[in-house]
Image: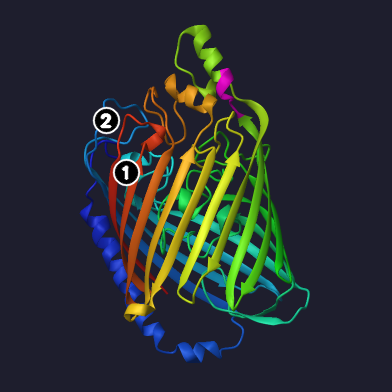
Amino acid sequence: MTDRRGTVRLRPPKLAACLAWACLAAGAKAQEQPASDQSAAPTEAYALHGQTTFIDQFHFAFPAPYEGKNSLSPDAEGRETWDLTIYDGFRPWKGAEFWIAPEVDQGFGLDNTAGVAGYPSGEAYKIGRSIPYVRLQRIFVRQTIELGGGEQNVDSGPFQLAGKTTKNRIVITAGKFSVDDIFDSNDYAHDPRHDFMNWSLIDTGTFDYAADAWGYTVGAAVEWYQGDWALRAAVMDLSIVPNSPELDPHFAQYQLIGEGERRWTIHGLGGVARITGYWSHGRMGSFDQAIAQAQSVGGVPSTALVREFQGRGGFGFNAQQQLTGDLGVFVRAGVRNGTVEPYEFTDIDRTGAFGVSLKGRRWGRPDDMVGLAGVVNGITAIHQAYLADGGIGVLVGDGQLPHPGTERILETFYSVAVVKQFHVTLDYQFVDNPAYNRDRGPVSILAARLHAEF
């Protein structure tokens, strides 16, 4: 691993990435031809899919009179990430699907994934490595219990075998997967491999969902689809300590999640609204106790020194609406208990986001996509006081915070479909008050993304 202030430029992994996505792109192009035959194919018993994504991200130099352990470096910096995922699924019995998804990862986020609460790359994990490595990120079984209400087609894709199911149904998922595979979904902003890249746009920034440092955990979820409504619930394992690569082996620290969804159609244009709530039970530190403990000994506050079993919860709202066949809008908003340290995701106690997404049909590029979105993130007064005294969060911590402010982010991208399943994307993000600090920034961030799938 290189020093966090160094710039990673790894030619062998970059070459491996290029070869991987080139091969997948070739497969994708070949697969485009028999699409009509596939639409008439019988129910799939087995499927194999794959994807590879390479991102090169760079931020320009920006003014900063000081920096801390979790600061974004004021010097210009570039980093790259690459991953390759294989999705292998089959039907072990009627109504069931078993999926396994090994993944190869390599690279680093800017400043080793630190310095901005609304972090600019959803493909950057909290653990970076110079050499590609393999992890089994998902292995789960899904059981669908059909309840009638008419049939609907299910297309073949990652974690989805082609076939038919009923509109009313119960779906049970158990094993290792990501909470955001099921919860807080949004068609316009939820996948950093296809659309927006900022953490607080692809997920509601206050949704501190259970996960290890790579974003995955173990547990079980139940979904009930009935007409235009859906209800979801899950119990998931927390990491052994906040922001850890290891999950709690005894499931003594856990998270309960619930979500309600309402779908509608207005003049043939679809819309969805979701409300998501969660409650985490684990060993977490309160900011006021950390500050008091530091003052008693004359040190810097640390929530790690005052952790105790307690609960912490939050709510989020997420909606989307088609305006035309090619144009859609989305909003996200969330709030959570800001007196206790974040456990898994990032340092955001309040958030609000709005964005638009447009396909390129109007200019003869139906598979291209352009997006524009903004998000405002905030923290509570006691959270600000903790950072001002030198405390460190999950992603932020400049060593001081004399002039706090809201973190404001604008992101825009254009995704070019070279072929239908191989896209090249240019992305720009503008971050004002990074890490809630009005003394630092603003900063501009550019990225190029290559993505192929089959």
- Res. 414 mark: none
Q: Determine whether the residue tagged by mark 2 lies in a helix, strand or loop.
A: loop
Q: Quadrant of the N terminus?
A: top left
Q: Write the residue at 41% across / 62% down.
A: 195
Labels 1, 2: front one: 2
| Quadrant of the snapshot with the C terminus | bottom left
Q: Position of residue 307 (x, y in %)?
A: 60, 24
Instruction: Give percent across and percent down for residue 215.
Output: 51, 49
Horizontal and vertical percent position of residue 42: 60, 88
Secondary structure, mark 1, is: helix
- Work out whether residue 178 can be spotted: no
Q: Is residue 1 left or right of residue 344?
A: left
Q: Which residue is mark 1?
A: 110
Question: Nearer the N terminus, badge 1 or badge 2?
Answer: 2
Residue range highlighted in magenta: 284-289
**Along the line of sight, the residue nearer the viewer: 153 or 14:** 153
Q: Which residue is mark 2?
A: 64
The residue carrying pointer 1 sits among few (fewer than 14), some (14 to 19) or many (20 or more) residues within 10 Å by Cα, namely many
Three-letter amino acid code of the residue under disc 2: Ala
Q: How many marks on residues?
A: 2
Q: In this view of the protein, which residue sits in the foreground, 171 or 50?
A: 171
Residue drawn at x 51%, y 69% as measured from the top left:
158
For the point 24% across and 37% down, which residue is it?
A: 62
Query: Is 382 in the magenta?
Result: no
**Residue at the far right in the pictured view:** 147
Decide if residue 397 is in sight here.
yes
Identify whether 164 is placed above or below 108. Answer: below
Does the magenta segment cover residue 286?
yes
